[in-house]
Image: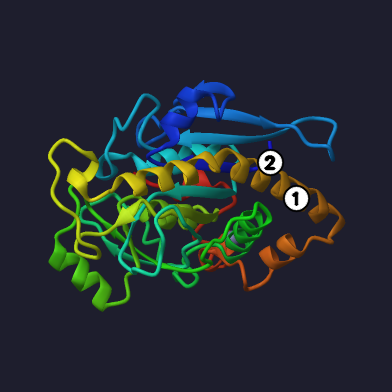
Amino acid sequence: MSGFAVIGGSQAYDLLSRGAIHGKRLGPRKTPFGPSQPIYVIQVDSQATAQPIEFLFLSRHGEGGYETSAPFVNYRANIYALKDMGVNRIIAWSGPGAINPSYKVGQFVVVDDLIDETQNRQSTFFEKGGLGFIRQSPVFCPALRGLLVEVLKGQGLDPSDKGVYVCTQGPRLETPAEIKKFASYGGELVGMTLVPEVFLARELEMCYAALCYVSNYAEGVVKREFKAGELFEGLSSQEDKLAVAGAVAQFPNIILEAARRLHMESSDYVAGTSPLTQSMDSIECPCQASMERYRREGRIGGDWRRWIKK
Ligand SMILES: [Zn+2]
């Protein structure tokens, strides 16, 4: 196992059902927070290794459709389950709306900052024990973000390497005035899923980066007629839908290439020559030492499962 996992967003079930992403289904994993979403092992052929590279895949909203909407995803169970299976790096995908009109629908954005507008989500593993007072800059793993941007450019895509993601509670969409408010304080994209996932990953010292594709323009950014019975009641145009389908079709190639590169970087790490893993050791990637202060104080030990007291 490469220690790498992908959390698929709202189009993941389509890719699974069409066979664009396929692998062995391991099923849900039991955790102290309830069962996770079903986990798959994906295999990727690699010329550089005799054995196929393996990584884990989990569809955030379910396997058969949009079964679990964003506020009701069991984020703690999903992140716990991945950690429990040896994962230390996660790439998650999400299809937010654009608040900043300079983004194009279908464009990839490797977001670099976040504003949390969710309400009442279970956003920490540490209900007891006084742990979790953790710095959030950088929010997303800089090393994984860099790798994602390289992969996207290598595939001839034109990603944006930064963006401020506003995470709302949902499942409803935002009002025009809310979007104006988010824009006024620097929000550029609006979605419902990266919180608390990114914060939970940091609590368990996992690297986490998000691959966003712009699904539509947020309410009020461009003029759209109300159309009953259509996706987002007309907020998404026919052109937008085509652009999104084009972006989603790229996902299998992007994640397979990211898995290959991560595997190579991990192999190089043994030899101590990898730029990615060297940066993992430096201040550029704080993710895997986020609990170091508590470790030094003797408040936590080596077994991360015992950090969590319910
Ligand atoms: Zn990291």
Tell me the CA gap for discs 1 and 2.
Answer: 8 Å
Q: Earlier in the sequence, mark 1 or mark 2?
A: 2
Q: What residue would you read off at disc 1? A: 266
Please identify the quarter of the rendering in which residue 151 is found.
Answer: bottom right
**Dot 1 lies on which element?**
helix
Task: Dividing the image into four quarters, tell me where ligand 1 lies.
Answer: bottom right
Amino acid at the residue labelled 2 = Ser
Seen in the picture, residue 300 relative to 171 is either above or below; the reply is: below
Residue 2, which numbered label? Answer: 2
Kindly identify the amino acid type of the residue bearing the numbered disc 1: Ser
Q: Is residue 218 left or right of residue 88?
A: left
Q: Is residue 124 visible?
A: no
- Determine if residue 187 is in view: yes
Give the percent coordinates (x, y) of residue 238: 31, 44
Residue 36, image x and y in percent? 41, 32
Mark 2 packing: few (<14 Cα in 10 Å), some, or many (20+)?
some
What secondary structure is marked by label 2? loop
